[in-house]
Amino acid sequence: MTRVSPLSGRQGVTALVGALALGCSAEVESYATDAETGSSAHALVTVQRSISADGTPPHADVLAGFVRVPAHVEPRALYELLGLRGAIPALGQCRLKMGQEATPSLSGVGRVELLEAGDVWVGAQGSEATLAPHAFPTVIDQISGVLYASRDRSPAAFPAASSYNVRTAGGPGLPSLSITKEAPLELDSVTVGGVVFGEVKELATSAPIDVTWGVGAAGDVVVAELATSERVLTCSFRDEAGAGSIPAGKLDQAGAGRFSLHRVRTTTFRAPGVDHGELAFQFELGTSVSFKP
């Protein structure tokens, strides 16, 4: 199965959507999803947009999953395994990942069902896109069912600063769903060490890296990501602060890589048949850089 990066953006959602696209999206196997005593249902939807300052084509991806798990299970690791969420460090903290991640253990989880939700629509009000169902790769016997992914990868199909609808027609054991949430603003006015973002070509990691951005909304999070071929450093900041500093020496690998900021907003909801729902937005602004120790 495709490895999930710290964020389910460029290396997470995009990679998993690409893997799923290798399978048939027209017909999916029907899975039994009758409600069972002692289980809970979760609806997870991620909207990811990526804009680059280095000429890399922009793109957007949406991934949705409707998951039934035993009620005693804390499902965060499962969300990451499925590619529905990425691991973000606590506010004010940084996290370094080196090499291949270990696959989260499903020991004690029991059977996990990815529920069939019928037709699924996600997008700005009045222009929702239909997501395509894909049978989940059967690498892990404990998990079966379908995930839903966007066909259109154009950022124009999934705009920032808009009201989003998530709707489903419903399926066996899962009623229809309709919710509306607000997407955050695109990142703008970004500087790195006092330099306009689009002009950044090198970053010295032996000194603190100071970043500023146009303030978004209270409660949103801005995540800085420094990625090389072998290491990924992520640091998390409050959006309303408008600034953050990546501590010196956290990334010790020199060479070509990518620096990006992600504006993250996670909204929660409950609905008939859904014990816990999340609609997450992850809007990235990135560029290729050379890291200097």
Image (cartoon, rainbow, N blue to C red):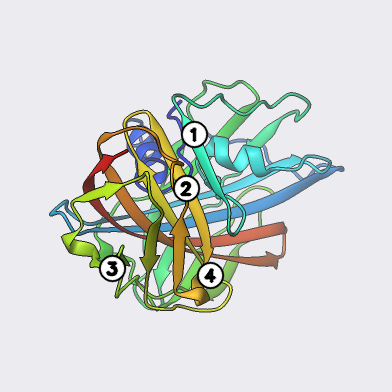
Question: The residue under label 2 is which amino acid type?
Answer: Thr
Question: The residue under label 4 is which amino acid type?
Answer: Asp
Q: Quadrant of residue 195?
A: bottom left
Q: Is residue 89 above or below residue 130?
A: above
Q: Residue furthest front?
A: 207
Mark 2 neighbour class, 10 Å CA radius: few under 14, some 14 to 19, many 20 or more: many
- In the rendered structure, which disc, 4 or 2, sits on the residue that comes first in sequence? 4
Answer whether labels 4 and 2 touch (C-beta < 8 Å). no
Instruction: Name the secondary structure under disc 1.
Output: strand
Q: Nearer the viewer, mark 1 or mark 3?
A: 3
Q: Nearer the viewer, residue 14 or 193?
A: 193
What residue is rendered at 62% in x and 54% in y?
90
Please tell me the numbered disc located at residue 194: 3
Position of 34 compared to 15: left or right? right
Question: The residue under label 1 is which amino acid type?
Answer: Lys
Answer whether labels 1 and 3 touch (C-beta < 8 Å). no
List the residue tagged with mark 2.
234
Q: Nearer the viewer, mark 3 or mark 4?
A: 3
- In the rendered structure, which disc, 2 or 3, sits on the residue that comes first in sequence? 3
Q: Nearer the viewer, mark 4 or mark 2?
A: 2
- In the rendered structure, which disc, 1 or 2, sits on the residue that comes first in sequence? 1
